[in-house]
């Protein structure tokens, strides 16, 4: 009980920092993604448009974001089960051909898929030791380079979105290619952008930054969700330990009272025998 209570307090302290980080990043990332989806429509003919160019899907990469440690309830298993559902459903055809790989961010995902002989493109376990934009950007750049070279035709992010300390929602998010918004797909809009110095130069610089920001936000969401899940799990474990201690104390008192009663009965019985 003391251990789980201490782990709960540690997770609560870490949760506060992680929650502040993701709530500050989320509005910026979402707005940047909205702008990018709008201005990248029809950019296939310029440099940088490779990240928004749709092509026939032959090889798929799924980025699974979990944690390095357990004791956080169903936080990790929900990601693994969701990806197994994708492999049996949406990506069943590609998976049967061996054309789906998993990039595991976090030790738990790596252990899960390796034991099931599912192709793993790599396991990144050090990222959460010092999570920052530069560290996450390095991984995002690797994925972007693989996509640009044609190694993968589609990249999906699967991670837990942080809602509150007790709720994390599994999110499947298209990472590459960039999905054009409904506005970019041809619907009318009142939004208009003035490009300076040029649309081409803006897109060349904006797309990589947006993708790195999107990836970093996903990692922040996952980290906040992990601490929230662990805090909730340890809170429940502490309550269960208290109830167990209460039940064991009651059981001990009953056994002690029964032993005392037996001793009294033996004494009384012995005294009656002597009197007789």
Image: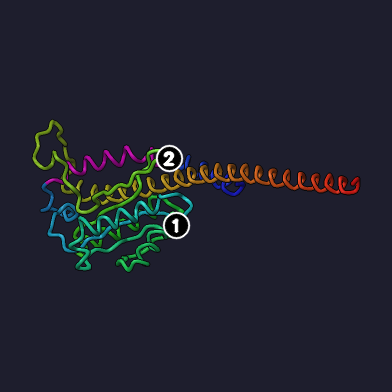
From the viewer's side, name the closer residue of 219 and 72.
Answer: 72
Dot 1, crowdedness within 10 Å: few (<14), some or many (≥20)?
many
From the viewer's side, name the closer residue of 221 and 142.
Answer: 221
- Which segment is the magenta one? 22-41
Q: Where is residue 187? Give x, y as percent.
A: 9, 37
Q: Which color scheme is applied? A: rainbow
Q: State the mark number for residue 11.
A: none
From the viewer's side, name the closer residue of 49 and 249.
Answer: 249
Pointer 2 residue: 166
Horizontal side of residue 76 vs 176, given as left or right: right
Q: Where is residue 165? Give x, y as percent.
A: 44, 40
Horizontal side of residue 237 vs 254, given as left or right: left
- Quarter-wise, where is residue 253 in the image? top right
Q: Where is residue 73? Give x, y as percent.
A: 44, 49
State yes or no: residue 33 in magenta. Answer: yes
Q: Where is residue 237? Give x, y as percent.
A: 53, 46
State yes or no: residue 186 in magenta. Answer: no
Sequence-wise first label, 2 or 1: 1
Horizontal side of residue 118 vs 180, given as left or right: right
């Amino acid at each position: 009980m003391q251990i789980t209570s201490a782990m709960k307090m540690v997770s609560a302290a870490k949760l506060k920092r992680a929650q502040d980080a993701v709530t500050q990043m989320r509005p910026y990332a979402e707005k940047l993604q909205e702008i990018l989806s709008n201005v990248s429509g029809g950019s296939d003919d310029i440099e940088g448009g490779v990240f928004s160019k749709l092509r026939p899907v032959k090889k798929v990469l799924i980025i699974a974001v979990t944690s390095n440690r357990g004791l956080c309830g169903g936080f990790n298993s929900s990601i693994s089960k969701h990806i197994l559902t994708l492999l049996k459903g949406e990506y069943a055809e590609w998976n049967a051909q061996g054309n789906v790989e998993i990039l595991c961010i976090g030790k738990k995902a790596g252990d899960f898929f390796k034991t099931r002989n599912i192709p793993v493109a790599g396991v990144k376990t050090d990222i959460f030791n010092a999570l920052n934009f530069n560290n996450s950007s390095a991984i995002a750049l690797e994925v972007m380079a693989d996509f640009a070279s044609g190694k993968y035709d589609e990249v999906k992010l699967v991670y837990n979105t942080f809602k509150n300390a007790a709720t994390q929602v599994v999110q499947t998010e298209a990472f590459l290619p960039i999905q054009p918004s409904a506005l970019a797909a041809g619907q009318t809009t009142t939004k208009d952008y003035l490009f300076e110095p040029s649309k081409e130069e803006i897109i060349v610089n904006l797309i990589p930054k947006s993708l790195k920001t999107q990836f970093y936000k996903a990692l922040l969401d996952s980290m906040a969700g992990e601490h929230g899940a662990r805090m909730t799990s340890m809170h429940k474990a502490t309550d269960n330990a208290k109830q167990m201690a209460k039940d064991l104390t009651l059981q001990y008192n009953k056994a002690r009272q029964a032993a005392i009663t037996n001793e009294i009965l033996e004494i009384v019985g012995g005294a009656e025998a002597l009197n007789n």
